[in-house]
């Protein structure tokens, strides 16, 4: 596992809107080169198959990361960054991911707060990314 968690302490803001994609209802932006896909929860529900799994003793229900990337038009990526909040949501984080490590065990769980949480079977719980707002792949 080569994922690296970088903590961006710039301002240590608690305001989820600081990193939120623009546009009404947009919860996630996916970018590859100049291609940008912006998703609302309703759009994800209409266009991406729902998935459920149990990770670390907790039920996760949402969308497989690979399915969201495919629906976003992403192809042939090697490296990515997932931006969101840390475990206690007090600070922004960026999780570096490699295509070689992402599989069917990586899910964007839809939380009770209407946000997305990236969780994976081979990613320790303290490295899960809460309130995911952006995924950039190259």
Image: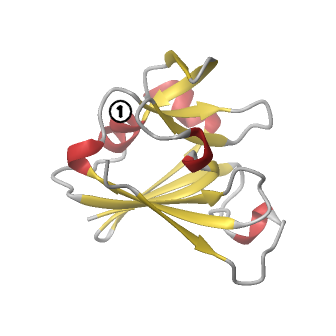
The image quadrant that residue 135 belongs to is: bottom left
Q: In this view, does 126 lie to the left or right of 74?
A: right
> Nearest the camera: 7 or 50?
7
Q: Position of residue 2 (x, y in %)?
A: 31, 55
Q: Position of residue 10 (x, y in %)?
A: 70, 83
Look at the picture and state if 119 lies above or below 2.
above
Q: Is residue 130 left or right of residue 3?
A: right
Q: Residue at x 69, y 78 (%)?
A: 9
The image quadrant that residue 13 belongs to is: bottom right
Q: Which residue is drawn at 46% across and 40% down?
A: 123
Element under disc 1 = helix
Q: Where is residue 45 in the image (x, y as percent from the top left)?
A: 55, 26
Q: Residue at x 34, y 60 (%)?
A: 80
> Nearest the camera: 130 or 1?
1
Which residue is the site of mark 1? 67
Look at the picture and state if 94 lies above or below 67.
below
Q: Where is residue 59 in the image (x, y as percent from the top left)?
A: 62, 17
């Amino acid at each position: 596992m080569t994922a690296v968690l970088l903590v961006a302490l710039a301002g240590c803001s608690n305001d989820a809107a600081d990193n939120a994609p623009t546009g009404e209802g947009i919860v996630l932006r996916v970018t590859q080169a100049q291609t940008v896909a912006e998703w609302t929860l309703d759009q994800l529900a209409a266009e991406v198959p729902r998935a459920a799994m149990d990770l670390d003793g907790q039920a996760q229900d949402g969308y497989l990361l690979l399915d969201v990337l495919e629906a976003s038009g992403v192809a042939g990526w090697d490296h990515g960054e997932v931006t969101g909040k840390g475990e206690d949501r007090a600070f922004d984080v960026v999780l570096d991911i490699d295509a070689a490590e992402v599989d069917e065990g990586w899910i964007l769980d839809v939380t009770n707060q209407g946000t997305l949480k990236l969780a994976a079977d081979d990613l320790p719980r303290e490295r899960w990314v809460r309130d995911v707002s952006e995924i950039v792949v190259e």
